[in-house]
Image (cartoon, coloured by chain):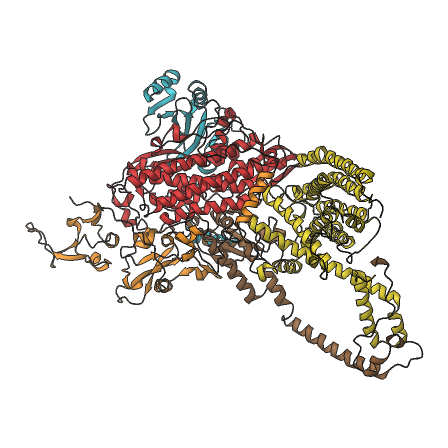
Amino acid sequence: MSTITLFSASDAIAAFLLAHIAYVFPAPVKGWITSGDVVLGLASLIFGVILLGASMINTIMLIWWERKLLGRFMDRRGAMHVGFAGLLQNFADGLKLFRKDTFRPSKADSLGFWMSPTAYMVTSVVIFGILPISTGWNGGSLPLTLLLALVIFSFAPLFIFLGAWASNNKYALIGGMRSAAQMIAYEVPILLAVVAVVVLSGSFNLTTIVLEQRNYWFWAPLFLALIVFLTGMLAEMERIPFDLPEAEAELVEGWNTEYGGMLFAFFMLADYVRYLVGSILVVLLFLGGWTLPTYVPSALTSFPLAGIFWFMVKAYLVFGGFVWVRASLPRIRTDQLLRLGWMRMVPLALLSVVLAALVVAAHCLPVLGCVPSMGG
Amino acid sequence: MSGQTPLPAKVPPASAGPSAAIADMPLEVIGQPGVPFVEIETLRAREFIPAAKEALTSLLKEQANGKLIRPVFNWAGRNSLFPLHWGLACCAIEFAAAFGARWDAERFGVVPRSSPRQCDLLIVNGTVTWKVAHKLIALYEQMPEPKWAIAMGNCATGGGPFRTAYSVVPGVDKLIPVDVYIAGCPPRPENLLDGILRLEQLIKERGA
Amino acid sequence: MAEPAPSPPGEAPGTEEKPLLWVTRPLATAARQFAKSLWRPSTVIYPFERLEDPKFRGEVAVASGRPIGVGEIWDNYRGVHALNINTCISCNLCAFSCPDVCIEMVTVPGGDPKHPKKCPQIDYGKCSFCGFCSDACPEGCLSMTTRYELTAHKREEMVYSPAKMFEVYKSKLPMNPIRVERPKNEDQILLDPPICIGCNACARDCPTQCITMLDIPKTTPKPGEKVPKRIWKEPVINDSDCVRCGTCISVCPKDCLFWGTRQ
Amino acid sequence: MSEMWVNMGPQHPMTHGLWNLRVRIEGEVIKDVEPEMGYLHRGIEKISEDRHYNEIITLMDRTCYVAGLAWEQLFIVAAEQALHITPPERAEYIRVLSAEFQRIASHIMWYAAFVQDIGLMTPFLYGMRDRDLILDLFQSYTGGRLTYEYMRVGGVRNDLPLGLTDRCRKVCDWLMDRFVEYDRLCLSSTPFHERCDGLGVLEAPEAIAYGVTGPMLRSAGSRRDLRKDRPYSVYDKLQFDVATATTADVTGRYLVRMEEMRQAVRIIRQCLDWLDDHPGPVMAAQLPRWLGAPYAPVGNEAYLLKRNYPTGVGFSMVEEPHGEAGAYIVNDGGEHPYRVKFRSPVLINIWASKRYLPGYRVADIPPIMGSVDVCVGECDR
Amino acid sequence: MKTNELAARLTSKFGEGILGVDEFPGLLGRVRFDAAIASKLFHTFRDDLGFAHLTMVGAIDWIDHREVFYTLWSDADRVYVMLSANLPSDAPTIASAVPVWPSANAHEREAWDLVGIRFEGHPDLRRIFMPEGYAYHPLLRSFKIHEPEDLEVKVRSE
């Protein structure tokens, strides 16, 4: 395969590095160092570091993007004085938070208090790692990537609730409970919407799902599922109008009330990684991933890293849509949120599954002359 | 797919060492049994290790002098001041106006947070009474280091028009250390921004 | 108790707003604002642009989408005080009229040793910028400028000495132009002649020098009464020059001066 | 979860100021509330006893910092009654103009804070932006953005500058457009109605029993407005309607305030027309200087000695943006009032939360308390 | 209703308890009453005369005695009336108006806090503005405002 993939690139880097490091060691060690296992190990490490770095930089750019967009929605400018157009603002924020005192309230549970932000962060980054972003950037091309991503995505309430309970604060506890209830409630419609996509594409592998969208993107036939998925994602991501766990007006800062410094930065970054992951999932499942429609001139799709570029443009635009919603809607209440989830979203999602099945059936009808696109 | 991509069998010695002999030698030969250990590599190692050591020492020295990482953190700290979202009295309205569309304090990275754990700037925007004084101190103590305090307006600075009253603390500097005072009753939002810029200057000079 | 009645119709449309397709209208409103503020949000980039700049006034501001210039008639703003030391007459009126008692009269060089020249020193940690002092200043030497930035690292820096305020004056900032008219029927300072001992204290301390001690022909002493061996003098106050500061009343040892209206 | 007491305040985003709402909750349902005040008690009534009448005006701006001119008017009406002074008519019109602009500014401030409570962030900035225009107008003739020190016993400090009325008209037109935008962002959105409809219901008889006034009372259908019922200043010469709603809930209060802003624009336009046609003095002609002059060197004790002071009492109730504010001034014949007593509508409106909060959920506290329009400065004084 | 009508009605009902009904600028009148009949008078005003709204309760310290005043609003007559009672300085006690008008709750707590009037029958007569345990009633004339310098000394010593 001639294309450079992320893993082959990190492999090359590892081999290159090891070959040079090997200079300074005597022969037996040298031989071991340049052997395949070590190269593979180092390559995995580099692979991980690249993913981590990419997720962090993307996250920070996402925060910048949200602040600038939100500023324009609000008739103001947003961060603009630190770095060009405020690009360095979030790096400053991050560095500052890492340097600040990190302390645990005296009555908080030590293990839970320290563990939950770390675990929340790790799981969020892992999802980013396994999602394909282009044909080359393909972390875990497992047959069931989609399921794996959603499973890890739903770990979050556990850690949030753990952290909220451990901080021994009433606001945090209420926020954690709301968060858990809300995330669990919206798993169902999200999964049903995903089932619609799976029915249409016939695979749980995200790469296959993207490739299945070469003729048409799935948002058109599965518009209902897209709506359900977007709503569910808003709820899973705890953004306005569903940001009840962090509802500032009643619960100070929600479940991270007692967190400060680095741990707060972990929560914040992990949140934005989740926003990124949510946007990426929307792009993968409904907006054709890294592909562009065929009528787009090939000059736009043939430059290096074009796949990643267009994918990120789509993901940031989707996130811009989330920001738009945040700028214009109020927060709703827990009971209304749950009612919306169970009474509206689940039936809609079921309906969209039926629609997807109908579309597949239409494909199979020889009358229409379409080729069934099952398999993969 | 990429996950199953086999290891590249041969890595071409694209940019090899300085020695021509080494550069010409195929890479996998080095370190194979039977190939003699080349003296020049040892020399390179001997050169490399003290050089690396020296570089590391100088780095550590610079770090100890506060020239390496501290300026970066200082830059970060002064450019992202999170004030506590707390309105005391009249100045709180101008405090809010400073975050409104016209002045937009977020341009400087000033974002109010509601929880003192996540803040590093306490803007005392209004009259402090004895009844709330201990709560103010508690909030200040809940903020993690490094932290700063701004006394915004006359009431926080010196009690203002109410300093003769029985219930008012005549100046918040009696309770917590104040870094910057802002005059005005209430100060214009520009004045608040000016105070924040002045605090940034102070952090830059004083280091923190 | 009044019985419930429906809300009367307002003048403007918009009160009948009803939800349309859940959330479309708020989304559209936000998007419209987004498009409007894409190129020029209403933010004033403060340290680089200032509201009192000409670009935020008048027609220029209107052209950029605002209904009125943001900094219209900025000169009326009550900011930091400017003091013209040269014309200050040390009348204490500013200190007396200050509701927050933040003005202290301090000695400045320039007076004679007997009557040191005193000018106001303002503690901005107490001043509430009400403008009573500049309204009260009879000579117009203490006025408020449009300067609003005043920050300090130390509490002591918040105290502005006369010299510091003179520097503000010399920086030629626009002054607050509104002058308050004096009322037509001001109270005057009257004398209770029988009590006056002619001690000259009032004339000595009068900041405007509007009190002159004039010889008063005393009535013929009654037989047996001792006539003091000195010239009787009585203060005569020039009403047009008097600034009504009340200094003479406070220095009068015999309390023979009082407020009133001359018939 | 069993019952527990939660302290909301004094540092809490919901409170909009320094007060503490202690809430007893069971799960998420409110069982009982206990408002705690006094965190901003600045002893204004006591300080006023040692201040000259004109000096108390500087305190009035700070008593209610979102409606300074309304409180100045409240005090001035009572003080003029206590001192037997009649201001010129032009001054009265300027006062009404200022008070109505202040009403709009205060309601916009309320709107900005309220929508933030229910999670809408954008209108907060729109509100602050539009309020700044009104503050610009205030600054152009009073010299202050928030603390004006403009009204004096016997009139106002200075006349309106040239061209101000035109600018006021432009701002009025602009504001009328913005009100439509506010409604689009709130009334047109289903989540807003889901969040606010039927919350914090306080029917009129209970509202009156609990002393609740202002938009909260009018939202229950009562047509009570002191500007109509007991006209002070020149309100009897102006045309306007009393804004009411029938639902007595959060949405009703929203509707009442929005309509009040439109009515205030209507009043302002009438005032502007009158002011254009009737130039004249803005300060009463026959004023002893110590009393009614724009300034008085009252720090000098000698200045105040040996004068003949009138005696009297002054009582005024004013329809302030938050509700009915009252002032009672006892003048026993001195340079200072003997006793000044203010009635704060906010104190009572918050106090009645014991009646209208229990039964709802914790998530409903921000919209309900936000709809009260809390200004702690005047509540604690 | 006119002031003299009110006076006639009240005097016929309470007799000695009403000490006088004065003209008061801008109000229907000021009813001076004996503190002993307070509770009955409140009921009369609310039930018979239609003053459903209690707007203000305040107190004045006249050094030799203290005065409590209530202002009431009638929706039907659109008029305010003021009730006032003199209480002795050493035992300033009067019946609470809370059973009649619940809105009196906060007002009476304020009057207790600042002027030291005791309202009997008040459900929860605590300080409202000053912290619990504060020793003074600040609006009494005997309570002098601190000089700020005194306070600074106090702060430093703490």
Q: Residue furthest right?
A: B34
Q: Is residue D138 left or right of residue B206?
A: left
Which color was chain E given?
cyan
Residue drawn where x is 46% and y is 32% of the image: D214
| Colour orange maps to chain | C
On the rendered image, what quadrant is the C terminus of chain D found in?
top left
- Look at the image and tell me whether residue D81 can be seen: yes
Name which quarter of the figure residue D188 lies in: top right
Q: Residue furthest top?
A: E12
Q: Is residue A166 above or below residue B80?
A: above
Whole-percent x, y for residue A240 in the image: 63, 43
Whole-percent x, y for residue A90 in the image: 63, 58
- Look at the image and tell me whether residue B142 can be seen: no
Whole-percent x, y for residue D137 in the image: 39, 47
Whole-percent x, y for residue A270 in the image: 71, 52
Residue toward you, B11 or A22: B11
Which color was chain A given?
yellow
| Colour brown maps to chain | B
| Colour red maps to chain | D
Residue toward you, A49 or A130: A130
* Number of numbered labels in the structure image: 0
Q: Is residue D147 left or right of residue B69?
A: left
Q: Is residue A303 left or right of residue D87?
A: right
On the rendered image, what quadrant is the N terminus of chain D found in?
top right
Q: Is residue C118 above or below residue D114?
A: below
